[in-house]
C-alpha cells in the first residue's frame, strides 16, 4: 500500500481528533490552493504528458515547495511514469505524496519533535528568528505547552537590542504565571543569560527558554553575540544550550528559507518552528526547509490560540495539505 492510500485509509477510519481538526483547519488555505489545483489538473488530462508535468511543476513552485525539490520530484515522477507506464494523472499525484513523505524523512537526522528533558536539567532552549515572525508569541506558546505538562519554565529576555522585546516577554510571563529574568535595554545579552542560568539552577527549573535578538542584517555581530551567550550558558549549565529553535513565518515563503540558511551559518539549529501556517496558501515551505537545510520542523503554528502550536506530524501535515475535507 502506498502512502497516499495509507493516509486516506488512516484518516477515513479514525474519529477526527482535536489535533487532526487543527491541522485540517490550519492548512485550509494551503489545501484550497494546492490540493484543489492538483485535482483540477488531473481532471483536465486523460493521460499524463509533457504539458501535464510542466503544469505540475508550476503548481509545486507556487506552493513554495522550492525549485530544487520541485525539479527533483517532477523528474522522478516522469521517470517512474515512463518506466512503469503510469498514465493516470491521479496515480501520478498519489506517487507525488509518497515521494514527498520519503524525501522529508530521508533528510538529515532522525525526527524527534518534542523536547527531551533527559538531556539535562535545567534544559536550555535558545530561540532565534528575525523580528516580526512571531518569536515572542512562539516562546509563550512553548512555555504554555510545557507548563501544562507540569514543567517549571523560566523565560530569559536576552533580546536587549529590540525596543519593547523585554516588555512583551514580561507580559507573557505574567499571563503564564512563570518567572522571567531580564536585563536593561541595550545591555549585554550574555549577562542576562548568566543571571538566567543562576536563577534556573537555584530554583529547580526544568526548562529555560532564552529569547535572542534577530539582527540578521549583521551576521558578524549576531555570530559574536550568540557565541558569547552560548559560552556563558555552557559554563554554567553542562551541554547548554541543549536545543536551538529557529522561528520562521510561513507567509515569508522562500524568503523564510533564505533566513533559515543564514541563521544556520551562524548557529547550530536543532529545529524549526513554523508560525502562521493558518494564514498562508503556500504550505509547501515545510518541505522546502527540510530539503534545503536538513533540519526538522519541530512545531507548527496552526492558529492564534495558545494550544494551536502543534508538535509537527508529517502524516497530519500531508493529510491536512492534500486530503483533508474540502468545502462544498
Image (cartoon, rainbow, N blue to C red):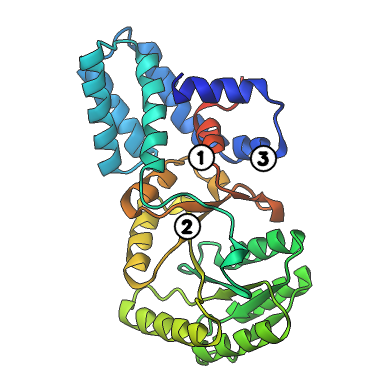
The residue that mark 3 highlights is 19
Q: Is 193 positioned to the left or the right of 246 in the image?
A: right
159 on left or right of 310 = left
User: Measuring 44% from the left and 21% from the top, which residue is drawn there?
Assistant: 2
- Give the residue furthest to the front: 118
Residue at left 58%, top 60%?
115
Alpha carbon distance from label 1 to label 2:
14 Å
Alpha carbons under labels 3 and 2: distance apart: 19 Å
When the figure is inspected, residue 315 is found, relative to residue 162, above or below; the finding is above
Q: Which residue is mark 2?
A: 272
| Residue 299 x, y percent position in the rendering | 55, 53
Which residue appears at 25% of the width and 43% of the height? 68
Q: Secondary structure at mark 2?
A: strand
Residue 1, position as x, y percentages in the image? 46, 18
| Helix, strand or loop status at disc 1 | helix
The first of marks 3 and 1 along the sequence is: 3
Residue topped by disc 1:
314
Q: Secondary structure at mark 3?
A: helix
Q: Quadrant of the C terminus?
A: top right
Q: Classify 10 Å Cα crowding around label 2: few (below 14), some (14-19), many (20 and above).
A: many
Q: Residues within 10 Å of mark 3 (few under 14, many from 20)?
A: some
Q: Pick whichever of labels 3 and 2 is earlier in the sequence.
A: 3
Q: Earlier in the sequence, mark 1 or mark 2?
A: 2
Q: Could one spot residue 327 in this view of the protein?
A: no
Labels 3 and 2 touching (C-beta < 8 A): no
Farthest-out residue, top: 46
- Percent position (x, y) of residue 194? 56, 89
Amino acid at each position: 500500500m502506498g502512502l497516499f492510500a495509507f493516509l486516506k485509509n488512516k484518516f477515513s477510519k479514525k474519529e477526527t481528533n482535536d489535533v487532526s481538526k487543527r491541522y485540517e483547519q490550519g492548512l485550509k488555505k494551503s489545501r484550497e490552493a494546492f490540493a484543489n489545483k492538483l485535482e483540477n489538473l488531473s481532471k483536465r488530462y486523460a493521460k499524463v504528458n509533457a504539458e501535464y508535468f510542466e503544469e505540475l511543476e508550476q503548481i509545486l513552485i507556487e506552493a513554495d515547495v522550492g525549485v530544487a525539490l520541485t525539479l527533483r520530484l517532477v523528474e522522478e515522477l516522469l521517470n517512474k511514469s515512463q518506466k512503469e507506464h503510469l498514465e493516470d494523472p491521479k496515480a501520478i499525484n498519489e506517487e507525488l505524496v509518497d515521494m514527498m513523505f520519503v524525501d522529508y524523512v530521508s533528510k538529515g537526522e532522525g525526527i524527534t519533535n518534542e523536547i527531551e528533558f533527559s538531556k539535562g536539567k535545567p534544559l536550555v532552549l535558545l530561540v532565534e528568528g528575525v523580528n516580526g515572525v512571531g518569536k515572542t508569541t512562539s516562546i509563550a506558546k512553548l512555555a504554555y505547552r510545557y507548563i501544562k505538562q507540569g514543567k517549571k519554565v523560566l523565560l530569559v529576555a536576552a533580546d536587549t537590542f529590540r525596543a519593547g522585546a523585554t516588555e512583551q516577554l514580561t507580559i507573557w510571563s505574567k499571563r503564564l504565571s512563570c518567572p522571567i529574568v531580564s536585563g536593561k535595554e541595550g545591555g549585554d545579552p550574555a549577562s542576562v543569560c548568566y543571571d538566567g542560568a543562576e536563577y534556573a539552577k537555584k530554583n529547580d527549573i526544568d526548562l529555560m527558554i532564552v529569547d535572542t535578538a534577530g539582527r540578521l542584517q549583521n551576521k558578524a555581530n549576531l555570530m559574536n553575540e550568540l557565541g558569547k551567550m552560548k559560552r556563558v550558558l555552557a559554563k554554567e549549565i553542562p551541554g547548554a544550550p541543549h536545543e536551538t529553535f529557529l522561528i520562521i513565518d510561513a507567509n515569508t515563503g522562500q524568503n523564510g528559507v533564505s533566513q533559515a540558511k543564514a541563521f544556520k551559518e551562524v548557529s547550530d539549529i536543532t529545529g524549526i518552528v513554523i508560525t502562521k501556517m493558518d494564514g498562508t496558501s503556500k504550505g509547501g515551505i515545510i518541505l522546502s526547509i527540510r530539503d534545503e537545510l536538513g533540519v526538522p520542523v519541530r512545531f507548527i503554528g496552526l492558529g492564534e490560540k495558545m494550544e494551536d502550536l502543534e508538535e509537527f506530524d508529517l502524516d497530519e501535515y500531508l493529510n491536512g495539505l492534500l486530503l483533508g475535507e474540502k468545502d462544498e
